[in-house]
Image (cartoon, rainbow, N blue to C red):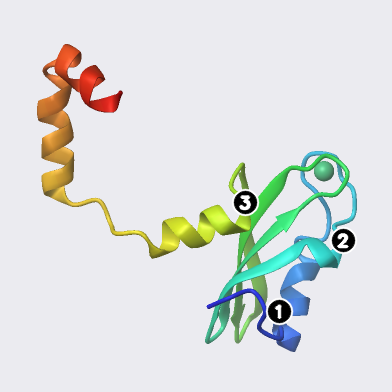
Amino acid sequence: MKSKKIPSVDYFEGLKLIATCPLCDAAYDPVTVRIIEERDDIRVVHVTCQKCMSAVVALIMTTPMGVSSVALMTDCTPEDVDRVRSSESVTLDDALDLHEMLKRPATFVKQLI
Ligand SMILES: [Zn+2]
């Protein structure tokens, strides 16, 4: 879902829970909030602090008991979050291939270059 969607009322209630930057305590500017995904009663947003430029990705959930949120500090931009969400998952074969490559450090470094 793209960030141009009109936010719901619950979205704004959820934002009250992440109203200030956890690093510098500055109030977030609502203009910097980008909706990454909004589905049913769950919203994922990206917020950038205009004072210290740190960012958080927050999961905002609306339940019958109220609105709650979990926020994680990130160095990702909203575009990074979209790109990672739309990329393919790492498979077990990917992990095994990496494990095999790490057994040969010289070859592994050459493949990275
Ligand atoms: Zn800040």
**Residue at 17% from the left image edge and 22% from the top image edge:** 102
Farthest residue toward the front? 113
Q: Which mark sits nearer the N-terminus, 3 or 1?
A: 1
Ligand 1's quadrant: top right
The residue pinned by badge 1 equals 11
Q: Identify whether 10 is placed above or below 100.
A: below
Tell me the CA gap for discs 2 and 3.
16 Å
When asked about the image quadrant of residue 95, the answer is top left
- Are the residues flagged by discs 2 and 1 in contact, CB closer than 8 Å? no
Relative horizontal placement of residue 108, taking residue 82 as reference (left or right): left
Q: Secondary structure at mark 1?
A: helix
Q: Which mark sits nearer the N-terminus, 2 or 3?
A: 2
Q: Amino acid at mark 1?
A: Tyr
Q: Secondary structure at mark 3?
A: loop
> What percent of the width, then of the height, locates residue 51?
88, 43
The residue pinned by badge 3 equals 77
User: Of tags 3 and 1, which is closer to the observer?
Assistant: 3
Q: Identify whether 42 is placed above or below 17.
A: below
Relative horizontal placement of residue 29, taking residue 54 as reference (left or right): right
* Residue 71 visible from this viewpoint: no
User: Of tags 2 and 1, which is closer to the observer?
Assistant: 2
Q: Amino acid at mark 2?
A: Asp
Q: Amino acid at mark 3?
A: Thr
